[in-house]
Image (spheres, rainbow, N blue to C red):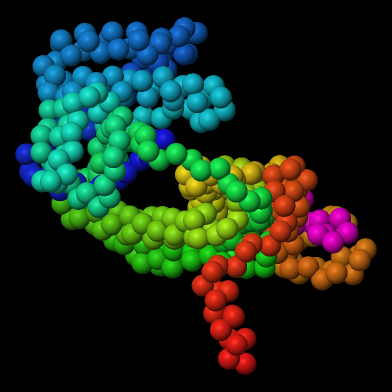
Amino acid sequence: MPKVYKYRLYPSKKQASRIDRSIDVCRLVYNLALEVKIWAYRNGTNISAIDLCYQLVDLRQTFDWIKEVDSQALQASVKKVDVAFKNFFRGSGFPKFKSKRNGGSFQCPNNTRKIDWGNGTLTIPKIKDIPIVLSRKFEGKIKTVTISRTATGKYFASILAELAHDKIQPSKTERAIGIDMGLAHFVVLSNGEKIDNPKYLATSLTRLKVMQRRAIRKKKGSQNRTKANRKVAVLHEKIANQRNDFLQKLSTRLIVDNQIDTFCVENLRVKNMVKNHRLARAISDVGWSMFITMLEYKGRWCGKRVFRIDQWYPSSKTCSHCGYIFEELDLSLREWICASCQTTHDRDVNAARNILSKGIESGVGSSEEPVEPRRMRRTMKQERIQM
């Protein structure tokens, strides 16, 4: 089973210079290939990735400084252009040119890669013995290595490894739970548990505005403006790290530390939801899509399932007791009373229960309550004995 391991790199000045050169040249090749691809698209013709690679050979023969970069990394950049156009025809956005302001990355898909676990170094084509912090050890064949540089000047290596011994274990039980995602509470479970939304961007927004205002007042092209922009990038990176840490821990707790085997979630269309200018910032900050993605790939690791229900299913407007649909339910109304059975509903809990019921109707699990952890059962037993 393939897994990705991300490690921090601490290259020397010479190694960092070579990494920066590889990133810049790969970005240049990508932009040139994209320009050729756009020209062919507008003229009604098609240029495949193989044809672009043939043009890459001519480019390497014309400019000697391109030969300083691994040829496989350049071909990987060309193939990304072809993948971007295929995604565009499948409904994604039109491919865009890469900017040097956002860091950058390049891939090393060939076999000349090696990790020295004893000395803590990584060797890739053209660059040897890069110091790396190997926080986690794995046993498997390395498929690809992606070297990336953040906007703050940090270097990382994302290693895709094929793990032969790590097999997916099928789930032994059929217990399901519904998950409703929102803005006031990030996650509301069908059992009534609510997890607050940390709102990391909203917390740091005042400081971010001040730093952006200071940066834009600096003279363009000056060192002071570069330093101010770097401070803004550091704050953005901090916010992203806080959000990623929260999502990783929450998804791991739900998948690994829970005896639930099937998770029912809404199939949200975030791209359409952010068109609402009043909620766009809050929706972008919460990270719903990233959370569902984490649930899915961690569920595959543990043999559990994540089922997405129809996005048009009225989970909030439907009464979880009798099925009555309250059409006039407004977004500001957090509690409502069913006109049919007179049941008082918490909007989010009711939505989570309806999501679970929809998943059960599709045959993905049962509504059986999860088994309590062994430690909790032991504690409750001791309390009863003491009484």
Percent coordinates x, y for residue 278 in the rendering: 59, 56
Q: Is residue 165 above or below residue 171?
A: above
Q: How many marks?
A: 0
Q: Measured from the top left, where is residue 293 in percent x and y?
A: 51, 45
Q: Residue 22: in sight, yes or no? A: no
Q: Is residue 264 visible?
A: yes
Q: Is 52 on the left-hand or right-hand side of 67? A: right
Q: Residue furthest right?
A: 340
Magenta stretch contains residue 318: yes
Q: Which residues are magenta?
A: 314-323
Would you say the magenta stretch is mainly helix, strand or loop?
loop
**Residue pictured at 35% horizontal, 40% vertical:** 4
Q: Residue at x 44, y 63 (%)?
A: 200
217 and 94: which one is in front? 94
Residue nearest the observer in this picture, 272 or 206:
272
> Percent from the top left, x then y, of residue 123?
15, 34
| Placement of 105 over or under 72, stated as above or below | below
Q: Is residue 317 magenta?
A: yes
Position of 373 compared to 335: left or right? left
Identify which residue is drawn at 21% across, 19% down.
71
Answer left or right for 144 relative to 290. Answer: left
Q: Is residue 365 above or below residue 107?
A: below
Tell me what residue is drawn at x 25 percent, y 52 percent.
135
Q: Quadrant of residue 117?
A: top left
Instruction: Classify residue 32 by image quadrant.
Output: top left
